[in-house]
Image (cartoon, helix red, strand yellow):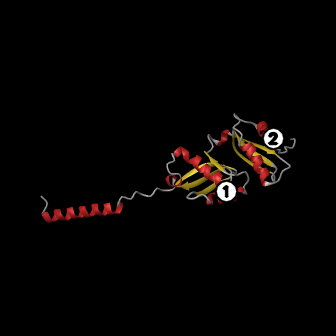
Amino acid sequence: MMPSHRFATVACAALLFITAAAAQDNGKKAEPKDEQFTYRVYGLFIVDREKDLRETFQEIADVKLVSVSFDAAEVTVEFVPSKVFPGAKPEQLVERLDQKVRAESRGTFAVGPRLAGPRDTFERVVIAVAGLDCRACELGAYESVARLEGVAQATASFRDGKVTALIDPLKTDRGKLEDALRKRGVQIPKR
């Protein structure tokens, strides 16, 4: 049997512990933590556009741009989903972020799900182009190719004289890319 003063000391210590824990919790839930997400980015057609992309993300409240990969056409961002998109389901996050990115960039940038499948199953196509030299023309050439089914990634630089695309050869080919560019008014020199 435990002596009564020892029992009182143990009981008092337990009561203090419980009281301290209850006071510390005080009904407050732990703050949700930032989570990192990597998405495919559209509109990053030349390296120089990275600055514009960073400025776009600076204007989106509570979303931090962690990194940009021009080579993979991806961005990694960090945010608290429940704070930035209250009530959104996990599968809705990319769509909701895309809406914010499009609105803030006036439609020149967008985000989407990461590239499906291993990169080595895609084919790199480089098309020589000529004639146009402004950024809006580069964007137009980029968009005409990047929006085609089967195009995973694209770049367009009239300064470098080329449009480059990473394609799924089961869904598209060089001819379709060239046709899309010609419809946009892009000159393709004969090979």
The answer to whether residue 160 is above or below residue 21 is above
Q: Position of residue 5 (x, y in %)?
A: 15, 66
Q: Which residue is mark 1?
A: 53
- Front one among 162 and 19: 19
Label 1 packing within 10 angstroms: few (<14), some (14-19), many (20+): many
Q: Which residue is mark 2?
A: 183
Q: Amino acid at mark 2?
A: Lys
Left or right of 9 on screen, residue 94: right
Picture residue at 36% right of the left edge, 58% below the top: 27
Per the image, label 2 sits on a secondary structure element best described as helix
Picture residue at 63% right of the left edge, 53% below the top: 101
Q: Position of residue 89 (x, y in %)?
A: 51, 45
> If the image is split into quadrants, where does the N terminus sit?
bottom left
Taking the view exactly as shown, the residue that stands out farthest to the top is 170
Lower sequence index among marks 2 and 1: 1
Picture residue at 85% right of the left edge, 48% below the top: 130
